[in-house]
Amino acid sequence: MTPPHSERGSVTAELALALPSVALVIAITLGGFGLQIERMKLVSISATAARALGRGEVESEVVSQVAQADPMALLSVSHLEDFVCADVSRSFKLLGLQNFEVGERQCFRKMGL
């Protein structure tokens, strides 16, 4: 016979209450890792674009190269004295919460000087 005020089943109830929160934290953490992986891809794309622009390649060709690497990426070019900079950005949706703008900027010396 069990006592009338037994705690039997309380662990199951606590787990059932905490499990959605734990699952949400894990999902957000994995989503954050995914954003960092995508950011590293943008680092590579922007570095390649900055090098190409620094070598004197035509901007329209570099834009098409960026579009081939990532069709959703946006390229913006800026010139700073002896440097040319490529800003590559993209919007990502994380778990249906909101859009996150992820971007990277890489600069390269003009004509390799």
Image: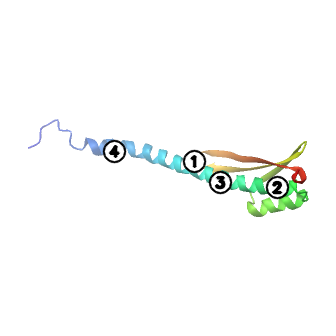
Q: Which numbered disc flags the more N-terminal residue, 3 or 1?
A: 1
Residue farthest to the left, as pictured: 1
Can the viewer see residue 73? no
Instruction: Judge by depth and name the residue closer to the eye, 63 or 98.
Output: 63
Mark toward the start of the polypeptide (2 vs 4): 4
* Crowd class of label 4 (few under 14; some 14 to 19; many from 20; radius 10 Å): few
Helix, strand or loop status at disc 3: helix
Label 2 belongs to which residue? 51
Colour style of the rendered protein structure: rainbow
Report the Cα–Cα distance between label 2 and label 1.
29 Å
Mark 2 or mark 3, which is nearer the start of the sequence?
Answer: 3
Of marks 3 and 2, the one in the foreground: 2
Task: Report whether residue 98 is seen.
Answer: yes
How much space separates mark 1 and mark 4, taking CA atoms?
25 Å
Locate residue 37, reporting x and y percent.
62, 54
Reading the chain from its start, which is encountered first: label 3 or label 4?
4
Q: Residue furthest bottom?
A: 68
Q: Residue at x 63, y 50 (%)?
A: 93
- The numbered mark at residue 15 is 4
- Name which residue lies at 63% across and 44% down: 98
Mark 3 → mark 2, Cα distance in angstroms = 20 Å
Please give the residue where the numbered disc 1 appears in the rendered image: 32
Q: Are marks 3 and 4 in contact (CB under 8 Å)?
A: no
Instruction: Please report contact status of discs 2 and 4: CB closer than 8 Å, yes or no.
Output: no
What is the spatial separation of the Cα atoms under label 2 and label 4, in whole angstroms?
53 Å
Q: Which one is in front in this view, the residue at disc 2 or the one at disc 4?
A: 2
Q: Amino acid at mark 2?
A: Arg
